[in-house]
Amino acid sequence: MFITLDGIDGGGKSTQIELLAQWLTAQGHKVQTHRDPGSTKLGTAVREILLHREDIPLANTTEMLLYMAARAQLVAENIRPALDAGWTIVCDRFLLANVVYQGSAGGLDVEALWQVGKIATAGCLPDVTIVLDIDPAIAASRIQRGQDRLEKRGIEYFEKVRDGFLAQLPCCPGRTAIVEANQDIQAIHREIIAIVKEEIDSRSSRDLRSR
């Protein structure tokens, strides 16, 4: 099973991914957590360029293709082999974020991005996509660390990003859900668990019918 959590920064993804991984492990699942971009040598290098190397100018199309390349490597090196071996994957962002940030908010053709994404992932897409939705102004107030290249683009940009997530989420395959992120951590966790349990139960029912 392949689960991804997404949404603008400041929505609490990292905390919820950790809690979800702990819950899944307690339920007997073998769990791996990854982040996109990241989790491979290539992905880590690309992430550094994309977010922190302001001395390297990036056209929007270049930015998009770097994300796609990092994702292609993540799928080939980590995600696909783990899924084939029976692991459950929980990923911090995936293709949806690329479509939203560089497409909806960045001006590239979103349909083209979905198509490029299918090639980059070789069709390996999440079974469950959960967007943690939060007002960008509230999210910005939560971010205590220094801002990266994307975060410096300001509230208006992130309003477009938020709108993009809500508009593009229905295009994701599999089970999709929006969780209000402006509530306490355990309340968010309970909602996420309920969504994931629905997917687990659905898979169990399909397995029984196929016997």
Image (cartoon, rainbow, N blue to C red):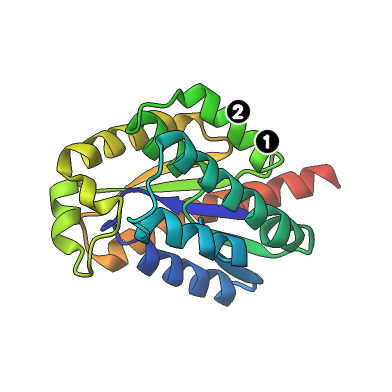
In the rendered image of this protein, does residue 35 appear above or below residue 168? below
**Residue bearing mark 2:** 115
Query: What residue type is disc 2 on?
Result: Gln
Residue drawn 61% across the image and 52% down it: 201
Q: Residue furthest right?
A: 211
**Residue bearing mark 1:** 119
Tell me the quadrant of the picture where the N terminus can be found.
Answer: bottom right
Numbered disc 1: secondary structure: helix
* Image location of residue 183, percent across then percent down: 21, 58
The one of 172 and 47 positioned closer to us in this rendering? 47
Query: What residue type is disc 1 on?
Result: Ile
CB atoms of marks 2 and 1 within 8 Å: yes
The one of 39 and 129 positioned closer to us in this rendering? 39
* Image location of residue 194, percent across then percent down: 45, 55
Label 2 packing within 10 angstroms: few (<14), some (14-19), many (20+) = few
Q: Which label was assigned to residue 1?
A: none
Q: Indicate left or right for 104 with 175 as reference.
A: left
In the rendered image of this protein, does residue 16 appear above or below residue 7? below
